[in-house]
Amino acid sequence: MKPGPIRVLIVDDEPLARTAIRNMLRRHPEVEIAAECETGVEAIAAIESAAPDLVFLDIQMPEVDGFGVLEAIGRQRLPRVIFVTAYDQYAVRAFEVHALDYLLKPFDRERFDAALDRARKELAGSDWNERVLDLLREQRGEYLQRLIIRAQGRVFFLSSTEIDWIEAQGNYVNVHGGGARHLFREAIGSLEAKLDPRKFRRIHRSTIVNIDAIRELRPCFHGDYEVVLRDGTELRLSHRFRGNLEKDFLGAL
């Protein structure tokens, strides 16, 4: 576990945003504000001189943006980073540079504290570099490993292994997994192409299922089957897509 206080750097070109973060941090006695910066250039210098443990980093800033700051610092000297921004379109890239969290403005105290708690646990961990290596290994995978879900001002990651099934909803899909349903901004055909076909199969024009979530198959009329999942959900396997399960469930069919 890291000894002493958690040294934090606040980087945002908006004074009110810096004040908001500073006020929320003051409620945590284990945190020490090492410095505040309003430009990316200042942030690069502050990270090199103050060596903070954690940086609350804005993305859109003049001259050098948040990603430019990280590129200038380099991976070997990179502190933990929580991005703070009013724009959700950078979430994918934030994950690629191993950000701990992604706070969408405006955020409340509860959401802020959750992000700080995550950073605290990371700092207490035994080997940050090993975690980065694990993420890099995962990213080399051929198929999508995680979905980035945006909901109610939050951005979080849902592992593909947590997904039970997916249903089309116009140009979006509802992703069912972990006991919840999440709206994901992608058409079902496009998402299907990104998922590992060894794990995910189309069973209906509007349904994809994780084969590891299948508990049983029940015959219905006209060559159709009901697919029963581990949580009891019943889905229709249409005759058109029957071949997608025959390879794995030939004995049952």
Image (cartoon, rainbow, N blue to C red):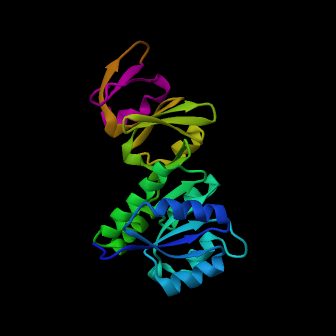
Confirm whether the magenta stretch covers residue 35.
Answer: no
Q: Position of residue 57 (x, y in %)?
A: 56, 67
Which one is in front, 18 or 99? 18
**Do we see residue 147 in this rendering?**
no
Apparent side of residue 62 relative to residue 180 in the rendered image (left or right): right
At a point 58% along the width and 85% down the height, the residue shown is 45
In the picture, which quadrant includes the N terminus?
A: bottom left
At a point 41% along the width and 47% down the height, the residue shown is 160
Q: Is residue 45 above or below residue 181?
A: below
Q: Is residue 181 above or below residue 12?
A: above
Which one is in front, 127 or 142? 127
Apparent side of residue 213 relative to residue 86 in the rendered image (left or right): left
Q: Position of residue 145 (x, y in %)?
A: 44, 53
In the picture, which quadrant includes the C terminus?
A: top left
Which one is in front, 98 or 53? 53
At a point 55% along the width and 50% down the height, the residue shown is 107
Confirm whether the magenta stretch covers residue 226.
Answer: yes
At a point 45% along the width and 82% down the height, the residue shown is 76
Which one is in front, 31 or 245? 31
Name the residue at the top extreme. 221
**Magenta part of the protein: which range?**
224-253
